Amino acid sequence: MRVDESVVQQLLEPPRRRALLVGDIPSAVPPILDELDCDHVQTAPETVVETAVAMGAVNAALIDPALLAADRTTHAIADLRALYPQMRVLLTGALQHLPAELLVQAIRGGLHDVIDPTDDDSLSGALQTCLLRSEQGAERVLAIGAHPDDVEIGCAGALLEHRRRGDHVAVLTLSRGDVGGDRNARVSESVTAATQIGARLLLADLPDTQIDQGIDTIRLIEDVVAALRPTVVYVHSRHDSHQDHRAVNTATMSAARAVSQVFAYQSPSATNDFAPTRFVPVDAVIARKVDVLSSFASQSARPYLEPELIVAGARYWARHLAPLARYAEPFEVIRSFIPGRSALSAAAQTVLNSPAPVVPMAMNSPEVRTGASV
């Protein structure tokens, strides 16, 4: 059984762009943002963080130069950069009219560029480039689970962190959870949870408790991977006593074989062989994870959804990060490869790719003498 094509098409539609207009931004800017399909909200430095959190991920912040003289503006920019590392910070003003000391202060505060709102020819291009650079720096995250609430239990904290940083998140749930409750209720709960996370939701309709690890399931997941082109995948661990969870893990290993970062999350049915080596701090979002899981009201009798247990589990795993974090989610690292060669210049690539003679080390050199002191 395949994912409905109309649902897969939704994955191809990029999420809405968002920009903050901080202070008195020239009237020429908002119409261009509208043309670029970018939502925008006006705010003041003292309310910028609250406004940004209410909006969700933010691609760009346009700052009124007159505000930079106030420390609160610098602090607000720093807070925004911490919340949304991919966000671009732009100063709106003619460069020749901006004092050098103000520009130095802005650069120290995280400024990326200056745009001249009086230059109609370059304004649109500058804003479009800014938004594209923000999107290019974002991860594309796909979390895969067998049943409604599986992904949310295992990695809702990590997904919320991804969204906080401005990454794109999608959740693929392969069954409607008929065996564990009313399917309509579980679908509705999944939609609510995905909305709270800020994720796009894909629901397949494989038979609950009878998910197969074979070619049909592999091709279903491959369709989504091909549409989304994820850079990060989260999935069940193979160390799990539930047959559906193991089947989804096996199918995903084939379907996501070209994805460079793949991590396995812990389910309540994970066995003692679950051996995480990656721990994601979720201090900033642990309360929101509890709220997300409260969406699954039809499963409220399940002990593993008790808020106290959720928080206690995150507190337990954070021992690996102490004293840097108080709450964490654990993951097994299946694959973690981040290509770095593409960042090299053409000249550097040429040097690295050119064969070079190997110079043998002299056997009497101090470096290879047994017991030699360095």
Image: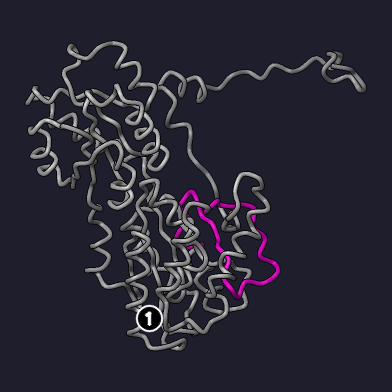
Residue 46 vs 352, above or below: the answer is below
Q: Which residue is drawn at 63% across and 18% down?
A: 357
Asked if residue 202 lies left or right of residue 315, the reply is left
- Marks counted in the figure total 1
In which quadrant will I find the C terminus? top right
Q: Name the residue under label 1.
A: 186
Image quarter of the N terminus: bottom left
Q: Residue 144 appears at what percent x and percent y?
A: 44, 66
> Looking at the image, which is closer to me, 64 or 279?
64
Q: In this view, does 155 lie above or below 111?
A: below
| Image side of residue 294 versus residue 67, left or right | right
Q: Which of 211 and 292 is in front in this view?
A: 292
The magenta-colored residue range is 253-282
Q: In which quarter of the image is residue 237?
A: bottom right
Residue at screen point 8% across, 33% down? 27
Colouring of the image = one colour
Q: Main structural element of the magenta stretch: helix, strand or loop? A: loop
| Displayed quadrant of residue 343 | top left
Q: Nearer the viewer, residue 142 or 114?
A: 114
Q: Position of residue 149 (x, y in %)?
A: 45, 73
**Vertical comparison of 184 with 271: above or below:** below
Label 1, secondary structure: give it.
helix
Q: Does the magenta stretch include residue 276?
A: yes
Of all residues, the one furthest to the right in this rendering is 371
Q: Which amino acid does label 1 sit on?
A: Arg
Q: Where is residue 22 in the image (x, y as percent from the top left)?
A: 23, 35
Is residue 363 shown left or right of residue 202?
right
